[in-house]
């Protein structure tokens, strides 16, 4: 793996809920993100996957300091973003951008497309000019739109076109790192493929790194270099893409892969389907959070929290019995 451009270490976010307790004691706490650690290399795409509500999007917002973390460290190019002074963090935001999930809600309906794209540059102190107007047109063409779209408003575009505008806005300050927060989940399947290909082309041209947050494992498989699997606020497995899809070792990862739709009606998965619902982060299970749904759970799992440990080169798993899990055959279509 290339040298890390982003290092996340023991990142924690607990949301304290309101209650009738005036003394702020014993208030319920949502453990949205619980000691999450990972790295992203230069020009690398790390996929972050898991069920809805597992803390993926919260992790992305914590990295960008859109939400203040409860504990942990986020180092970008050697600088701890959590401890950075406000002026320094503001200057660094040029290199840290995000593409939001909803391409409609993330664009200001009162602003023209040109203003939306150039807004990150205006926020850094640049002033409107003919050169910036021309730059906005260049960005529109780069993401597959036309210069004449610059004077239109967001409501005049389709969902896929609006997401392309969001991508143009994200790359306008020439960032080094972009968080793609479910960037294609609200789009049609055919449009998803176009946007994924666009993101890959931009990465190859501009040399950016991505944290690609998603729940569609087929999409993540197409774009990611490595994948981190998240469950109830914790990372349970990380591995290079090819290794994870061929030989997943955490029971939750195996269950996620078993849920991927297949194209051939006669193809049957050998993996067991995941049963039950994800527990509430208000009251997570003791020990391994996954043990109430795990087919391999034993007494040790109910009392002892497993740590992420390396069981193969580049593959780490938070499971006491990862060596005993069978490695299902890779997904394929019968001939």
Image: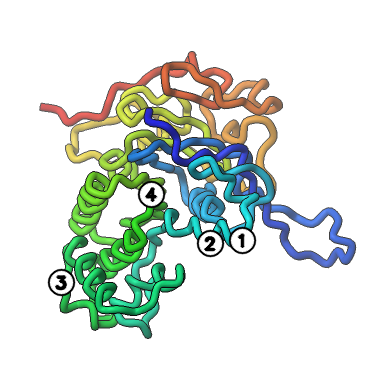
Q: From the viewer's perspective, is the residue at label 3 or at label 4 nearer?
A: 4
Furthest-top residue in this view: 324
For the residue pair 213 and 53, the one nearer the viewer reads as: 213
Judge the density around disc 3: few (<14), some (14-19), many (≥20) Cα neighbours within 10 Å: few
Residue, disc 4: 176
Instruction: Name the image quarter holding the N terminus.
Output: top left
- Residue 146 is tagged as 3
* Secondary structure beneath label 1: helix
Q: Earlier in the sequence, mark 4 or mark 1?
A: 1
Closer to the eye: label 3 or 2: 2
Q: Which residue is mark 1?
A: 86
- Specify the farthest residue to the right: 23
Q: Considering only order in the chain, which callout, 4 or 2, is on the residue closer to the N terminus?
A: 2
- For the residue pair 84 and 110, the one nearer the viewer reads as 84
The local secondary structure at tag 2 comes to helix
The Cα atoms of the two marked residues, 3 and 1, are separated by: 37 Å
- Residue 262 visible within the image: yes
């Amino acid at each position: 793996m290339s040298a890390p451009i982003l290092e996340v270490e023991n990142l924690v976010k607990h949301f304290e809920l309101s209650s009738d307790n005036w003394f702020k004691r014993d208030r319920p706490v949502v453990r949205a993100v619980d000691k999450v650690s990972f790295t992203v290399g230069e020009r690398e795409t790390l996929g972050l996957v898991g069920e809805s509500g597992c803390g993926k999007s919260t992790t992305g917002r914590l990295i960008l300091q859109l939400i203040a973390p409860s504990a942990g460290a986020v180092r970008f190019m050697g600088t701890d973003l959590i401890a950075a002074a406000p002026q320094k963090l503001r200057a660094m935001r040029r290199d840290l951008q995000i593409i939001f999930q909803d391409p409609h809600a993330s664009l200001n309906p009162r602003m023209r497309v040109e203003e939306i794209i150039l807004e990150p540059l205006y926020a850094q102190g640049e002033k409107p000019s003919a050169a910036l107007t021309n730059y906005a047109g260049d960005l529109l063409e780069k993401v597959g739109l036309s210069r004449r779209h610059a004077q239109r408003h967001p409501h005049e575009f389709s969902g896929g076109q609006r997401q392309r505008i969001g991508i143009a806005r994200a790359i306008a300050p020439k960032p080094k790192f972009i968080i793609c927060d479910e960037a294609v989940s609200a789009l049609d399947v055919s449009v998803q493929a176009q946007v994924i290909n666009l993101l890959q082309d931009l990465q190859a041209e501009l040399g950016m790194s991505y944290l690609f947050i998603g729940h569609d494992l087929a999409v993540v498989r197409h774009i990611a270099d490595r994948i981190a699997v998240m469950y109830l606020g914790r990372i349970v497995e990380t591995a290079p893409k090819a290794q994870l899809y061929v030989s997943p070792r955490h029971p939750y990862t195996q269950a996620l892969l078993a849920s991927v739709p297949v194209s051939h009606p006669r193809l049957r998965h050998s993996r067991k389907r995941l049963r039950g619902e994800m527990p509430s982060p208000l009251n997570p299970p003791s020990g391994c959070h996954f043990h109430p749904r795990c087919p391999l759970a034993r007494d040790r799992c109910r009392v002892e929290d497993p740590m992420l440990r390396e069981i193969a080169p580049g593959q780490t798993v938070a499971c006491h019995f990862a060596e005993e899990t069978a490695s299902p055959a890779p997904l394929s279509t019968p001939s």
